[in-house]
Amino acid sequence: MRQIIIALSLASASMLSVAGGMPFGGEDSVEDAKDLWKVLVTEGLVGENAVHSKPYKGMPPHGMVLDTIQKTVSVNGHTGRVIIKRNYGGEGVDVAKVAKDPKPWLKAVTVMFKREYGYDPENQNWFWAKFKPNGSLHSNPKKMLLAGRVAKGMPKGCIACHKAAPGGDYLFNE
């Protein structure tokens, strides 16, 4: 019996490595998210000195007010497109209040980064992360950090929602 359990454990570990590890929340995805955040700060896309775009009315799951910005950046030797969506909320939030002073209303920064070919070809090779305003990662109810192939294969979540975007590119604001 012990040999069967060991064999099954080894088979599972082997399948994970072939599949690229945990789809999200694993050590590699978290490290990639940290590296991405550092680049976004350096580029002035997030953090204290971030540039902002014109806020607009949003909807769940992102926020009642959003602002979206995109650029091409290089992270760990790979250059790809990044889409940053700042998610604003709170009682009384509206577009005018966010335009005047966004900081107190910022609840999350959701990011899509176009990774290298082969990262996740089924989902256009997008890397997903949901950051808190300070750059740490949000987690789901199961305490999995939201970085990597977030909610891959699940009926709800980043990939499931963005898969439905028109044009097949996973982008709604094109």
Image (cartoon, rainbow, N blue to C red):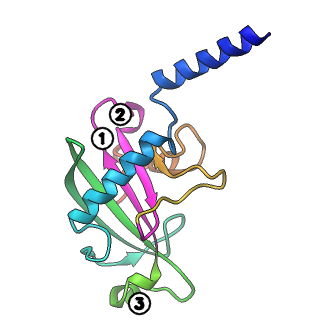
Instruction: Pick whichever, 142 or 120, lies toward us.
Output: 142
Residue 174 visible? The answer is: no
- Which amino acid, mark 2? Tyr
* Number of dots carrying numbers: 3
Is 140 placed above or below 167 here? below
Is 102 placed above or below 58 here? below
- Magenta residue span: 107-134
Comparing labels 2 and 3, the label whose residue is closer to the camera: 2
- Which amino acid, mark 3? Lys
Q: What's the CA distance linking mark 2 and mark 3?
A: 39 Å
Q: Quadrant of residue 39?
A: bottom left
What residue is shown with label 2? Answer: 119
Q: Quadrant of the N terminus?
A: top right
**SS class, disc 1:** loop
Judged from this view, the residue extending furthest toward the right is 1
Is 68 placed above or below 9 here? below
What residue is shown with label 3? Answer: 97
